[in-house]
Amino acid sequence: MATITKIRQQSGLVLIVIGLGMGAFILGDFFRPSGSGRQAQEIGSVNGKGIDRFEYENRVSEEVESLRSINQSPNPQQTDQIRQRIWNNMIQEQTVGKEIEEAGFVVTQGEYDDIRWGDNVNPVFLNDKTFSPDGIFDPNQVKNYFNAIKQNYPLYAKIQQQQLVESQIYNKYYYAISKGLKANSLESIAIAGSNDNRVSFNFVLKRYASIPDSTVAVSDADIKSYYNKHKDENQYKQQASRGIKYVSFPVAPSESDISFLNNQMDLLLSDFQNTDNDSLFVINNSDNRQAYNQVYRAGGFPYEFDSLVINSSLGTVVGPFVDGDNINLVKITGDEFEKEARVRHILLRTNGVNDAEVEARADSIMNVIKRKKNFEEMVTEFSDDVASVKDGGVYDWFPEGRMVAEFNDFSFNGKIGQMKSVKTTYGYHIVEILGQRNNRLPVTAVVSKLISPSKETYDNVYALATDFSINSGDLETFEASANELGYTVNEAKRIIKSAKGVPGMANAEELVRWANNAKMDEVSTPIELEDVMVVAILINITEKGIPNYNAISEQFKNLVIREKKAEMAVKEMSGIVDLDELAANLNVQVQNASNIPFSSNAIPGAGSNEQEVIGKIFTLEVGDVSIPMEGKDGVYVIELTDKVIVPIEDIDPELFAEDADNNYNNRVNTGVFNALKLDANVEDNRLNFY
């Protein structure tokens, strides 16, 4: 059935595409009991209620297995995405899900059918061409699809049913909330005003960046004073995190490892050359068991071996040779031939309205070429295909089907030496056929072996990393030992519990787990991460909440410097109301901005985050020159040249009522969940288990 083929091709048609996963509980007709009553390990908590590790694992496993049942085995990255989605689902169940349950929302069997093939079909089905074979949605195709997966892929069908029903019930809940949200007329008027009220002004800007940091004196007392004033602000609240320094010991194949593998391939060469069953030989001896009966095109292997493969006769084995991370033996097992053409052309682009004019021009140029035999000269003078001009307009040997249809058809169906004006979507091409041929392409079988470190190499690196760990009792000796051995000491400053890696290493969960469980100044034993061994030392522990002074002092120092620069600029710019004079004193230009709405956050040619400055500008009257105003990027002096304020009585609130309502409705889904989640005191302890 075509539908099932589609499933196999698309990694779970609706399961992955919809991304509806809200968990594994089903409301209404699909309720099932939760919890087994047994004591289990907890990987986190919501509102003080533990999240069962075994339930979490079962649900992850169930979703992974549902994909495997349709021959779509998730890779590690996809599995991580499933784990994160299931975690979010379980949080939603304990927050939004509880609200839904108390409100009494259900999805009946009839409603479930309705969103699949009734009057309110889920857009995923409506938009999938599988269910619209003739361009018109066919409900029977959806029925056939669900019957097929229920019969042939029951686990996949179960997961999909859960996802669809849960999506529907959440949508009903959020829709009900959105219907209770109605903006008042003042909010509608505010939206109108923010868009229609506008100002135009001239301004002089003294940028903070124009004042050298070296001219600003900052003391520890200044920084501590700033810290005490601002440490409780939400923008500076810190997540719990750890800081480490670490040394990486690469586990790479040695010259001995490569030599050993090369010798192994030498031993295979004679047998490979003499075998009558190349595919079976590849399956039995290659790391890539599908590398047989492959048509080879130039450029697939390193240059010196590429030409050997292209030009070798049937039965020849090329190699062994190193190709990236592999050593290859390549056997020529057959030949294929494909048509190729060599042409040169001049492109005259069209714009959709000047076709007749360009066609006549192409004919004229072609006639000149036929008389004067000056194709290359005309390419340089007239061709709009800049990339080919340097080669005289030549497209060297290309296979049939490579070019757009009209260009391709003439290149292969015309005769050598023939010249013609050809129309394509690019414009008119003056094309001359220089050659045509049947090009031989070798068919190959490849025995490929991954070049990997031997156990001896691994053990040597592990021993080196272990000695380093043992001899590094504190940070000083850690850094000194690394320097002595010639290794770089790297630093990761803020590793949070949910991190998957550290700077320079994307997949470093074992290192993250160690960092979040280590004691201050503790040195790790060697931690194996893909192709490296890592030894780390914990250098910092940041607790959640108010930032530690030492951890944030450098950031606050920069803010104090900016504050002092603002004071310096305000003092320098005060008392001058002539903008030309002020600009001359500062060695800058007077700039202007026109029709800036109240809703804008940017001043053209200046700052992109200047809402506060724009708000102050609206307090001025035409002709006013402001006092210096501190912004995010510098200090401004403004001269207001025009101001348009739409009177409230001229605004029809109904014109913007929908916009005002949408401001609420667009935030319902994420807003409700985030608010309940924030109030639920969610604890994520998965790092202790995975």
Image (cartoon, helix red, strand yellow):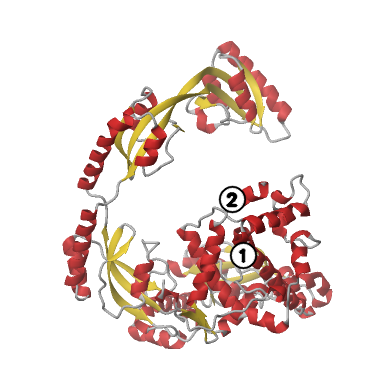
Mark with earlier residue (1, 2)? 2
Residue 304's place in the image compared with 684, above or below, is above
| Quarter of the rendering occupied by the C terminus | bottom left
Residue at left offset 81%, top offset 70%:
655
Residue at left offset 34%, top offset 59%:
530
Q: Which mark is residue 159?
A: 1
Indicate the amino acid at tag 2.
Arg
The local crowd at label 1, few if under 14, some if 14 to 19, many if 20 or more residues have their Cα within 10 Å, is: some
* Front-most of residues 105 and 200: 105
- Residue 314 at x, y = what percent? 38, 23
Alpha-carbon distance for marks 1 and 2?
A: 16 Å
The image quarter containing residue 211 is bottom left
The image quarter containing residue 591 is bottom right
Residue 495's place in the image compared with 153, above or below, is below
**Number of numbered discs:** 2
Residue 164 relative to residue 637: left or right: right
Residue identifier under label 2:
8
SS label for mark 2: helix
Residue at left offset 67%, top offset 50%:
3
